[in-house]
């Protein structure tokens, strides 16, 4: 496994949240997702990217571009926004 | 399923069990095993083809601004309310594997016998080993096996509490999975967070794992009986801990010999009093 289980559970939560928001907006597809990840959040960004690829399969997030802002000294793991169509 | 190595459990689900129970998988609603094909069919207000005819159109930016840990925080608050209502003092015990958490708990349970009812939630990836030890000490206990998970979360604690049914007015010890990183990010509904390190570890633990030490209320330095055999400077640990969290209380003790246990027991009783 190339990802840590911690990032996998975070990725699954991100996908769930994005999916829910996209559905509320009656969107067919997510083009881009922007995340704020604090450097003190315990999340390793590379591992998260890898986990997201897997978690997003067969969801509205599948082909989305993932944009991650690293927030210095922050602890957040936040879905900032999604670009949908 | 094999109790020793967990083989035979293909889904690697979270399992919650009492000592002596067949370890059945719990089909509770949990993020880790969440079914992703749950999305409902879309009912579109408009016709997509129509928008295509008009050329490029329809991209919308949706501000979400929601923290992933929010859901866990909400569940943790709920747990916290439950514990408050029942007069239960819930404590989250965290450390690296091997710090002596379980031995400390065994001794603590014996010390609190006939003084306060005690209950325990044990967290490990696999095995009932710790729960069996706690059961031998005489406290009601439930074991949470996280499978491949590296920390307990509020959902697991909620389910375990339902199974355990701790008595009103008890002290509930939640022994988290051995890990100095992830547990600090997941609130469980505890009233106090206790981090345990042993003298066989490095003095700079507080500096290396600042998130854990910043979020802790009490740090217990265990295995002081081994001080003559290791290069561990307690004063340095206190300095480093102060740098990271000036409000952190520290205690030194040896669960094995019992030295320093009285202030710890008193701390527990005092905290229970002011609940």
Image (tube, coloured by chain):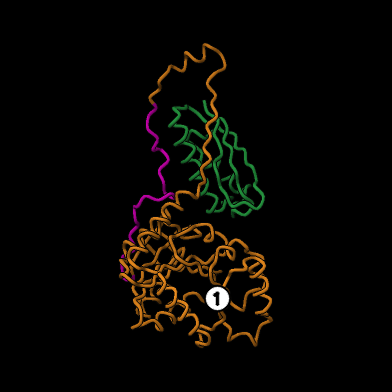
Q: Is residue A33 above or below residue B166?
A: above
Magenta stretch encompasses residue B22: yes
The chain to which mark 1 is attached is B
Residue B192 rendering spot, x and y as whole percentages: 48, 67
Q: Residue furthest front?
A: B274
Q: Which residues are magenta?
A: B19-42
How crowded is the residue under tag 1: few (<14 C-alpha within 10 Å), some, or many (20+)?
Answer: many
Question: Residue at left 46%, top 36%?
Answer: A19
Magenta stretch encompasses residue A15: no
Q: Quadrant of residue B126?
A: bottom left
Q: Which residue is mark 1?
A: B220
Question: Residue at left 40%, top 58%?
Answer: B156
Q: Residue furthest top?
A: B53
Q: Quadrant of residue B245?
A: bottom right
Report the side of B54 relative to B117 (left or right): right
Chain painted in green in the figure:
A
Question: Residue at left 54%, top 84%?
Answer: B254
Label 1 element class: strand
Q: Is residue A80 above or below residue B222?
A: above
Question: Residue at left 51%, top 35%?
Answer: A61
Chain painted in orange in the figure:
B
Comparing B226 with B233, the one in front is B233
Residue B80 rendering spot, x and y as whole percentages: 40, 60
Residue B194 rendering spot, x and y as whole percentages: 51, 70
Residue B177 rendering spot, x and y as whole percentages: 49, 65
């Amino acid at each position: 496994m190339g990802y840590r289980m911690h990032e996998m559970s975070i990725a699954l939560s991100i996908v769930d949240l994005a999916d829910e928001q996209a559905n509320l907006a009656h969107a067919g597809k997510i083009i881009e997702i922007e995340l704020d990840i604090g450097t003190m959040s315990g999340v390793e960004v590379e591992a998260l990217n890898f986990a997201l690829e897997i978690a997003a399969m067969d969801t509205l997030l599948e082909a989305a571009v993932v944009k991650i802002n690293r927030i210095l000294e922050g602890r957040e793991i936040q879905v900032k926004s999604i670009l949908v169509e | 399923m094999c109790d020793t190595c967990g083989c035979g459990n293909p889904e690697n689900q979270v399992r919650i069990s009492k000592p002596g129970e067949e370890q059945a998988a719990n089909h509770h609603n949990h993020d880790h095993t969440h079914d992703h094909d749950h999305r409902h069919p879309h009912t579109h207000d408009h016709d997509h083809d129509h928008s295509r005819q008009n050329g490029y159109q329809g991209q919308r930016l949706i501000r979400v601004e929601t923290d992933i840990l929010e859901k866990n925080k909400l569940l943790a608050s709920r747990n916290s309310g439950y514990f408050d209502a029942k007069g239960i003092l819930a404590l989250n015990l965290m450390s690296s594997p091997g710090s002596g958490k379980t031995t400390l708990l065994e001794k603590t349970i014996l010390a609190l016998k006939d003084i306060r009812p005690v209950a325990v939630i044990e967290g490990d990836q696999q095995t009932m080993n710790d729960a069996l030890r706690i059961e031998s000490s005489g406290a009601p206990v439930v074991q949470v096996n996280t499978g491949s998970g590296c920390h307990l979360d509020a959902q697991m604690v909620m389910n375990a509490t339902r199974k355990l049914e701790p008595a009103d007015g008890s002290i509930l010890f939640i022994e988290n999975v051995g890990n100095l990183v992830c547990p600090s990010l997941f609130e469980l509904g505890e009233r106090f967070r206790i981090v345990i390190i042993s003298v066989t570890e490095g003095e700079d633990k507080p500096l290396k794992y600042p998130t854990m030490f910043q979020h802790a209320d009490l740090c217990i330095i265990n295995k002081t009986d081994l001080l003559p055999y290791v290069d561990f400077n307690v004063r340095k640990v206190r300095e480093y801990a102060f740098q990271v969290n000036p409000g952190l209380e520290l205690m030194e003790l040896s669960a094995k010999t019992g030295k320093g246990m009285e202030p710890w027991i008193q701390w527990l009783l005092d905290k229970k009093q002011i609940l």
